[in-house]
Amino acid sequence: MKERVLSGMRPTGALHLGHYHGALKNWVRLQSEMDCFYFVADWHALTTHYENREVIEKNVYEMVIDWLAAGLDPNACTIFLQSRIPEHAELFTLLAMGTPLGWLERVPTYKDQQEKLKDKDLATYGFLGYPLLQAADILIYKAKHVPVGEDQASHVELTREAARRFNHLYGREINAEEKVQASLSKLPKDSVKRFEKARKAYQETGDAKAMEGALGYIATAPELDEQDRERLGGYFKGTGKVILTEPHALYTQASKLPGLDGAKMSKSYNNSIAIREDRATLEHKVKRMPTDPARQKRTDVGDPDKCPVWQFHLVYSDEGQRQWVSQGCKTAGIGCLDCKQPIIEAILREQQPMLERAEPYITNPKIVRDIVDAGTEKARITARETMQDVRSAMGLNY
Ligand code: SF4
């Protein structure tokens, strides 16, 4: 069984090369290594764009076409739509009952985004709660890994805290103490004594060796069945039964492509190149990119470190080409348009297969809808199973 990975993107418009290099390329690589679930986070888009409902539907399918164009293969990963699986909202509501407000208020992106998006009123309950909705998105699929950039690490940490709290609150069986004693009574008395001693050492001093020995013992003791093992494991660690699995942040090396002006690439900053940009627009955009301000004239020398075009060479050029740029810039041996030409060609080469892959989906949008429908059906099976466990643990299965 491959381990499960979960990731999503908000459908806020056509994707750009920053998305491709920062996340999508990595998604494409992961789909052959792990059981990847990728979802369109349309509810998340509403947390910041709740006034723009009419653009969301168009953006959803445009974005899925971008994913497929980038190389996601619906036979190798599961592509689905968050809002079509209401179980996400149910888990979010149930997690919200026991989540302290302070956990959400201290998520760094909460204040950051409010600062950055000053033109929007983000003093909303939905915006405060979106990291918990994200936690529900992850936990409902029992995902082991979540590919993230460093700025989202706090969201994965919140998800882990939410899972731990849930397991602590609801992972205890009814009559847990008696059931533990019944499981222990299957073991020889000496072994029970050693097990209790190790448990005390672990719970009082965090003795990892004691835990390793005791859990190793119960994992192989022939007197115990699977249920005993799980129960005694939870009793040992003081965690109870694991209902929601804590995920891990998957940090991967992604090359960061800045915007045309050197700031973060973003459609709202007007500094982006779309994944499926037409040739003329692409050429126009790159040719107009700002350069080192010291190079006013062709004969002025420049410094690549002060130029956004250089950042593009770091992503698109090999060592030889970079040397040509560095040397040519510092000696005024090349002009800025010469320097930009290989970037234009590299992006065109990168985009060509993407445009070809996108073509059948643009011509026949029904295929895209069918892909999303099939992925959503598949994802929903897991979401339903998790919710059955969750409801039963919370005493809601009446
Ligand atoms: S030559 Fe290239 S790196 Fe140097 S300033 Fe011009 S565009 Fe930038």
Image: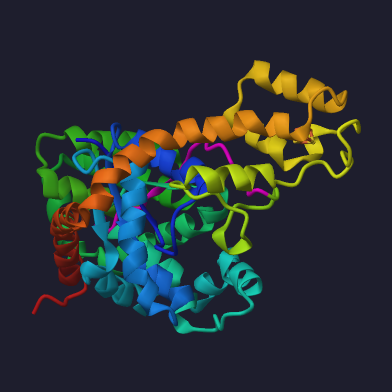
Q: Position of residue 153 (x, y in %)?
A: 52, 53
Q: Quadrant of ligand 1?
A: top right
Q: How many discs mark residues in the rendered view? A: 0
Q: Residue at x 66, y 20 (%)?
A: 321
Residue 121 position, x and y percent, is 56, 83
- 105 left or right of 192 in image: right
Q: Quadrant of residue 145?
A: top left
**Viewport quadrant of the C terminus:** bottom left
Vertical position of residue 275 compared to residue 33: above or below: below
Q: Magenta segment range?
A: 241-260
Q: Main secondary structure of the magenta part?
A: loop
Give the image quarter of residue 164. Answer: bottom left
Q: Residue 377: percent from the left, percent from the top?
A: 13, 58
- Quarter holding the N terminus is top left
Relative to 350, say whether 139 is above or below.
below
- In this rendering, would 235 be left or right of 118? left
Q: Front-most of 363 and 117?
A: 363
Residue furthest to the top in view is 320
Residue 28 visible in the current orientation: yes
Q: Check if residue 254 falls in the magenta segment.
A: yes
